Image: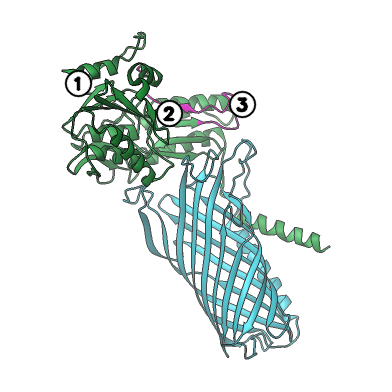
Amino acid sequence: MKRLLLLILLIAISGCADSLVAPQVDTSPPAIFHELWNEFALRYPNFDSRHVNWDSLGAYLSARITPATVDTDLILAMDSLLMSLHDGHVSLTPTHVQYPTNAKLRYENTDSVQEFNLHIVSQDYLGETANISSSGKLIFGRIHDTIGYIHITGFDETEGESLWQSEVDSVLQSLWDTKAMIVDVRGNIGGEAYSATDFASRFTKSSRIFLYEQERVDHSYTDLSAPQPEWLNPRGATWSKPVVLLTDRFCISAGEWFTLAMKTLPNVTSIGDTTQGAFSGRLDRELSNGWLYSMAFQKNSDANHVCHEGIGLIPDIEVYIPPRIAFPGDTVLRRALQFLAQ
Amino acid sequence: MDLRAARITRQNIMSNLNSCSFAFFILLLSGSVARGQDTLPLRNRLTFELGYARLANFDNVGSPLPYAAAALPIGGTYEYIGEHDRHTLEGSAIVSLINAPTMSNRYSSATDLRKAYFVFLDMQYRYVRDLMPLFSTSIELFIGGSLETIIFGRRYNYYGGDFSSIQGSGSGEVSSALAPSADLFYALSQDQRLRASLSIPIFAYIARPGYGLLNGNTSVSGYSYDGRFQFIGSFWSWHIAIEYERDLSKYFMAGLRFSTLYYRYPRFDWVSSTAENEAKAYISWRFHF
């Protein structure tokens, strides 16, 4: 009897707490579509940069959604909505749906080919000098013994600031006697912005603004907060010899922060393809039906207040590889070595 | 896709509360006569509490879904009992992965590992003063006030993973609320007592992350915060407790306590509401400096 009373008490406690905070949740297809549309309408700051009329698109697509719409048709409508943004920080993951097998739908710009292959760089250019840092994020070595090479696959998210700094110090120290440095951010998947800024700070001798951040402040799509400057400050021993920065269309987010910071420096020349054009941080969210999505929430501009969102950072020397052509080796790295040899 | 949440209205919440209050009054008035206020010279009490709780939260910036968890809260109380008044300092803590699992929503399952890590800390200072015997019975009414500070931080991991995973969002609130408080004491016998207490905050300092939405703050991801004083009406909150206590000896007592805490803080397009119901067993040590 006592156990029964205890059980009843526990159930009462549990039920009461849950019901006190439970909101009205509408998971009908029109409500879910509107929820997704409205979250972007409230928070997304780059409609104008990406030339999207969000109201018009929402009205057009929502007309297709009824309470009887099945999940797959709802996914297709939401996919069309988000596809218009072509934003690498935007994604949709319809969990609990068998089709299309819980896949994360992504919306990057995919108008270029990814020629970069780290295996080819290691084998054909770095040879026995090829090395990898403790976090696995930095692959480095020497080309012709006099040129340092560092590839950054992504910027640290988990190790912590001090470990990342000591890792960067260690890699740079091992290449300090070279005459020039190739810093390769092709295929860089982003990561923590502080790690990107910290790495770039090893290449400047003076403090400078390299980026301004803005966010939405009210219901108007174009009303943004005052531009907040991001500073690049020198840290430790700074490298002032020539630097070639290699970029491609798959360099995104913190990779583009790094590129933006490096492009403010006089001894840096960028070579390769235009970057992705997605500078914001990423905001992960979920919908009332349990589906997941992510969005960008910042509008970032360069030191001259020029926004490259949706366009990307155009390199000083462009090497564009059309998708239908596959050259042997690494065309961009070859061009960088030619540039340094001049 | 079939999700049906219970519809909660102000009317049925108030109706439930009124029913509980009425039943408790009936229970009190039907008892025998004795003083509720402890008259022993041992005026200090140290209490250790352990129990079962259900913590539920809805935060529309963190998630459009309510999250909840069962917990085993631990807490402690220091109380000074004067001739006609009481000072009580009370604290309790629930921390996921220490005395609670992570919070989950109705979509969490074995294959869908989304969850919310959290820290819930509740600290309350309470002062009440003996006002009068009620209705010429042995029920004693104490009136006073309380200052209650609650810290509730949540880290949502929508894709599962451990605490270091960044695939989610963070949210939370810190509040310090001033409330008028009322306590009712009733002694069932020389060694058994009942106590009921109610606090309804009227003025609070509420802080939350500066989400940068509709309020001029500049950062969603940064660590700025939006904090301000608010009056009742712009937020709602209450804290109710019912307690049974029995002397074990001159120096020790044991008791059972049921309490419910609720708050709802809306601001701009952000709403966070939290309910914590708990049943605790406690043991107290009476002493004199």
The 10 Å Cα crowd at callout 1, few under 14, some 14 to 19, many 20 or more, is some
Q: Which SS class for mark 3?
A: loop
Identified by mark 2, the residue type is: Leu
- Vertical relation: B229 (above or below) A287: below
Residue tagged 1: A340
Q: Quadrant of residue A235?
A: top left
- Vertical relation: A238 (above or below) A127: below
Q: In the depicted view, which residue is nearer to us: A324 or B214? A: A324
Q: Quadrant of residue B115?
A: top right
Identified by mark 1, the residue type is: Leu
Task: Chain letter for mark 2, please.
Answer: A
Residue B289 visible within the image: yes
Q: Which SS class for mark 1?
A: helix
Q: Per the image, is B135 magenta?
A: no
Label 3 or label 1, whichever comes before in sequence order:
3
Q: Per the image, is A97 magenta?
A: yes
Disc marking residue A82:
2
The residue lying at 68 percent from left, 83 percent from top is: B251
According to the rendering, which colour does chain B have?
A: cyan
The chain letter corresponding to green is A
Q: Which residues are magenta?
A: A93-112
Q: CA distance from mark 3 to mark 1?
A: 53 Å
